[in-house]
Image (spheres, helix red, strand yellow):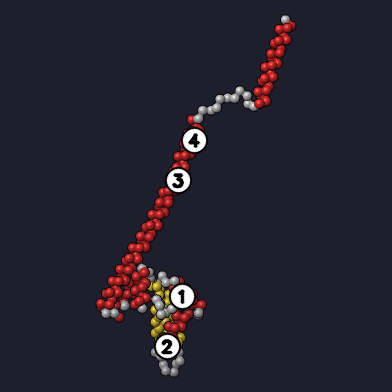
Amino acid sequence: EVGVVAAAAAAGGNLKTFSASITASDATAACAQMCTAAKVDCANNVMCDAKPKLAATRHLLASEFTTILVISADASEASSVESDLKAAGTTPTVTVEDPITRLYSLAQYLSVADFESLRSTTLAASTSKKESDEASEAAVAAEKDSAAAELAAGVAAANVTAAEIALIKSTTPSPPPRLFDDESSALASVVWCRLIGVTFVVMLFMY
């Protein structure tokens, strides 16, 4: 239990406790059933404890045990323990606990020197993990701010370019009027001029 609690505290997470009533021949068998139903390896990073609900009597082959599993909430299997137990026919009571608080409650089982060493190491690791997480969050926030600033700069540049184009359009002089709108108009003008010339010549001869 000390190892599970210390590992959870060092990781900066919480503890999850799953409690259920298991019928078994003894506490060892109760834990074996609980661990199998929960699909966890109770030999590594998961603590199991079983206590009989009633004083066992010799004529009973099996008794009810209040059986608990303690696991770090950050463990990969922690999220599926409850559903796995329910699927196996056991409905657990789930509680979440601060591992630091739980760690101090275990001081009575350790020597003063051992507990102090464990406490110092665990708290140092927890502080380091917290600082690392905060630094990562700050880096992510800074990256988002930088991206937002780049986007704003791009929008501003686009607005300036649009304004420059509008200014150029407003200051560019209009092209001179065309004498003829198209080729047919030009041809008609030539014919008209020639007709006027011929008429003038004919009038001269008549006079």
Mark 4 vs 2: CB contact within 8 A: no
Q: Nearer the viewer, mark 3 or mark 1?
A: 3
Q: Nearer the viewer, residue 147 or 97?
A: 147
Residue type of the residue flagged with mark 4: Ala
Q: Which residue is mark 2?
A: 26
Q: Earlier in the sequence, mark 1 or mark 2?
A: 2
Q: Please tell me whether residue 167 is drawn above or below residue 76 in the rendered image.
A: above
Mark 4 vs mark 2: in front: 4
Q: How many marks?
A: 4
Q: Nearer the viewer, residue 173 or 78?
A: 173
Q: Mark 3 = which residue?
A: 154
Q: Measure the C-alpha gap from mark 2 to mark 3.
A: 71 Å
Q: CA distance from mark 4 to mark 2?
A: 88 Å
Local packing at callout 1 (Cα closer than 10 Å; few below 14, some 14-19, many 20+) is many
Q: Position of residue 185 (x, y in %)?
A: 66, 24
Q: Residue at x 39, y 79 (%)?
A: 47
The front one of 196 and 1 is: 196
Task: Give the residue pinned by disc 4.
Answer: 166
When the figure is inspected, residue 161 is found, relative to residue 91, above or below; the finding is above
- CA gap between label 3 and label 1 equals 50 Å
Instruction: Using the rendered view, name the quadrant where residue 48 is placed.
Output: bottom left
Q: Residue furthest bottom?
A: 59
Marks 1/4: CA–CA distance: 66 Å
The quarter of the picture where the C terminus appears is top right
